[in-house]
């Protein structure tokens, strides 16, 4: 069988058979070598890439897998970079993990390696949300933070996300510099596996209490919450970390009627009641909605396994639960924050919100109306956090979000935070109820005032090397031969984030885009339609984002109007040859 395997792969496998790897690992490598050559090839054909966000991959033995050795190598590389970056007497790192299989084990390995490098390590005693890790980095004045999670990926996956001293994920130049240090680790003998136990400090309830206390201070209408404290809330943590703090945060906020989906409150990396632990998927909220219908609840909320993203379901005007998409949730939260800040006289002229370039333009319309600055950033919450850091002590952050179900209504965390967002969604539902309205009704009111915006995402997967080349060619073709019209509407502007230029087709002029280089194209049509195209950074996919809008008034049926925009997007896809 060995004769059919590439020599380079065999050499890598032999290193694991003969090096200082544990006996169990060697046995599994030997088993693959003798009985499962295809699995061996997949496990060793490349090194698991430490990308700009850290590691993510399938768990198992081999260089292309998440295991104690790939995690330890990443940790040693990070430790080496931290030593170069911080001239302080004691480097401190906080570590958290989610409910995934092996997350706690990987967190312990990470803590041991960092302690072996002489660092002080604050290790959460049990699973905790990613946003709480971000909070802990700042609260404990750490130089870095790490969370072991693969977010909403399937159960076979795990991951390793790295945070800097501001509690945000790595941005340039730190992301690429850490990658270089990790790539320098060629042998596991370079890893300081021997821990210094006294350097590992367990943390938990003390941080929970401070985190929840700060979240509670976000309430803009505590009097209304008190009046509506019996608001019926259904919450599911989807077998993840949210169960550790979301119910406590909601209670601290003032809500008493919190109903948890018991079957999904059990922390389990196999996600037994779910096809996918992803709150973007309607099926993930099905059990929660069933409970909500049974008890006649007001609002349904679900958090993903590491509790940084939130799915929301609310009752429509037919008293049926409907799922909001990420743009809709971000819209209502942004409207509520801006409206209440204005009513309370908190808008002084230096306030701002942040959104990503593929998030609904309705947020920009809201910011303009309330005379608040709106920053557009590249896809990825780390860029929202970067804007907060750059404007520290200069301007006041109100809120920020992205279409992929992530929102941050505070600045003491520097990543998307589903814990505080759950509290804010509940307060908005209480506010609406107090005023004879509903969460859904608020959304329709926003559409009536600012126009009906509708967004849709098309992901096209192209597998293998040929697929990757096809995706690259698609971007080249769109860049070199951009369409003059799409769906019979003129393309009037083209934003190319790779060349950092915005072309005005009508006036034959261009201006620079003040954002980092990224392989993204945007076509803006003469009816304000926006089409964004970008290859995925983590999967063999190319993504097309469509944003359309129309006027909307009280006499119009919302579903009919929304269907009209859905049909428009389908026509756009056809005209671009995508379907």
Image (cartoon, helix red, strand yellow):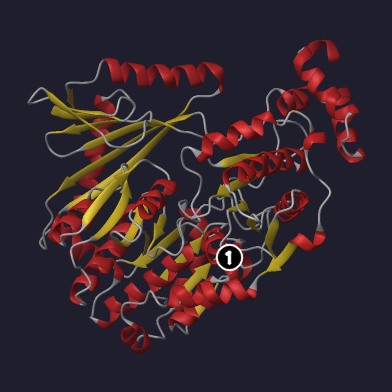
User: Where's residue 175, x and y in %?
Assistant: 52, 39
Element type at marker 1? loop
User: Where's residue 534, x and y in %?
Assistant: 38, 31
Q: Is residue 337 visible?
A: yes
Rendered residue at 32%/50% (across/down): 355
Position of 11 relative to 3 (above/below): below
Looking at the image, which is closer to me, 302 or 7?
Answer: 7
User: Where's residue 385, x and y in %?
Assistant: 41, 52
Q: Quadrant of the N terminus?
A: top right
Q: Quadrant of residue 122?
A: bottom right
Q: How many marks?
A: 1
Q: Horizontally, is 188 left or right of 89 in the view?
A: right
Q: Could you classify mark 1 by the number of other residues whose Cα lies within 10 Å: few (under 14), some (14-19), or many (20 or more)?
A: some
Rendered residue at 62%/75% (across/down): 206
Looking at the image, which is closer to me, 288 or 419?
Answer: 419
Q: Quadrant of the C terminus?
A: top left
Position of 259 relative to 517 (above/below): below
Position of 264 relative to 486 (above/below): below
Q: Is residue 504 visible?
A: no
Give the residue at mark 1: 140
Q: Quadrant of residue 510?
A: top left
Q: Horizontally, is 486 left or right of 112 in the view?
A: left
């Amino acid at each position: 069988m060995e004769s059919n395997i590439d020599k380079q792969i065999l050499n890598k496998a032999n290193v694991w058979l003969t090096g200082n790897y544990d006996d169990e690992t060697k046995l599994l490598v030997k088993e693959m070598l003798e009985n499962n050559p295809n699995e061996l090839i997949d496990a060793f054909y490349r090194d698991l890439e430490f990308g700009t966000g850290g590691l993510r991959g399938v768990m198992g033995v081999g260089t292309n897998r998440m295991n104690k050795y790939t995690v330890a190598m990443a940790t040693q590389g990070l430790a080496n970079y931290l030593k170069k970056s911080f001239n302080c007497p004691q480097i401190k790192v906080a570590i958290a993990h989610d409910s995934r299989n092996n997350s706690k084990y990987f967190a312990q390995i990470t803590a041991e390696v960092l302690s072996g490098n002489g660092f002080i390590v604050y290790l959460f005693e049990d699973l905790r949300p990613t946003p709480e890790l971000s909070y802990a980095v700042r609260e404990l004045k750490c130089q870095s933070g790490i969370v072991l999670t693969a977010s909403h990926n399937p159960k076979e996956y795990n991951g390793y996300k790295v945070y800097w001293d501001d509690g945000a994920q790595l941005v340039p130049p730190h992301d690429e510099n850490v990658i270089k240090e990790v790539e320098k680790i060629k042998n596991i003998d370079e890893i300081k596996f021997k821990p210094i136990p006294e350097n590992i400090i367990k943390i938990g309830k003390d941080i929970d209490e401070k985190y929840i206390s700060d979240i509670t201070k976000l309430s803009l209408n505590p009097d209304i919450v008190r009046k509506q404290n019996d608001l019926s809330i259904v919450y599911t943590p989807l077998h993840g970390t949210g169960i550790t703090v979301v119910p406590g945060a909601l209670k601290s906020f003032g809500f008493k009627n919190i109903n948890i989906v018991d079957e999904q409150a059990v922390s389990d990396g196999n996600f037994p009641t779910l096809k996918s632990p992803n709150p973007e998927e309607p099926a993930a909220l099905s059990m929660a909605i069933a409970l909500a219908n049974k008890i006649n609840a007001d609002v349904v909320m679900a958090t993903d396994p590491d509790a940084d993203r939130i799915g929301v379901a609310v009752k429509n005007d037919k008293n049926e639960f409907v799922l909001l998409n990420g743009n809709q949730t971000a819209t209502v939260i942004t409207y509520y924050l801006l409206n209440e800040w204005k009513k309370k006289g908190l808008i002084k002229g230096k306030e701002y919100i942040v959104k990503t370039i593929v998030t609904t333009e309705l947020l920009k319309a809201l910011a303009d109306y309330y005379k608040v600055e709106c920053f557009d950033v590249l896809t990825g919450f780390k860029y929202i956090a970067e804007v907060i850091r750059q404007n520290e002590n200069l301007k006041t952050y109100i809120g920020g979000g992205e279409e992929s179900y992530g929102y941050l209504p505070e600045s003491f965390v520097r990543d998307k935070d589903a814990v505080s967002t759950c509290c804010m969604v509940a307060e908005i539902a209480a506010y609406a109820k107090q005023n004879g309205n509903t969460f859904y009704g608020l959304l329709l009111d926003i559409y009536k005032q600012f126009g009906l915006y509708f967004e849709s995402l098309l992901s096209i997967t192209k597998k293998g090397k040929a697929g990757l080349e096809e995706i690259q060619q698609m971007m080249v073709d769109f860049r070199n031969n951009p369409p003059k019209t799409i769906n019979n509407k003129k393309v009037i502007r083209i934003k190319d984030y790779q060349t950092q230029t915005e072309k005005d087709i009508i006036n034959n002029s261009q201006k620079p885009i003040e954002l980092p280089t990224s392989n993204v194209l945007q076509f803006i049509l003469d009816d304000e339609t926006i089409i964004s195209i970008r290859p995925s950074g983590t999967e063999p996919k190319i993504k097309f984002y469509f944003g359309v809008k129309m006027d909307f008034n009280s006499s119009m049926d919302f579903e009919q109007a929304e269907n009209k925009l859905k049909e428009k997007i389908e026509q756009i896809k056809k005209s671009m040859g995508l379907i």
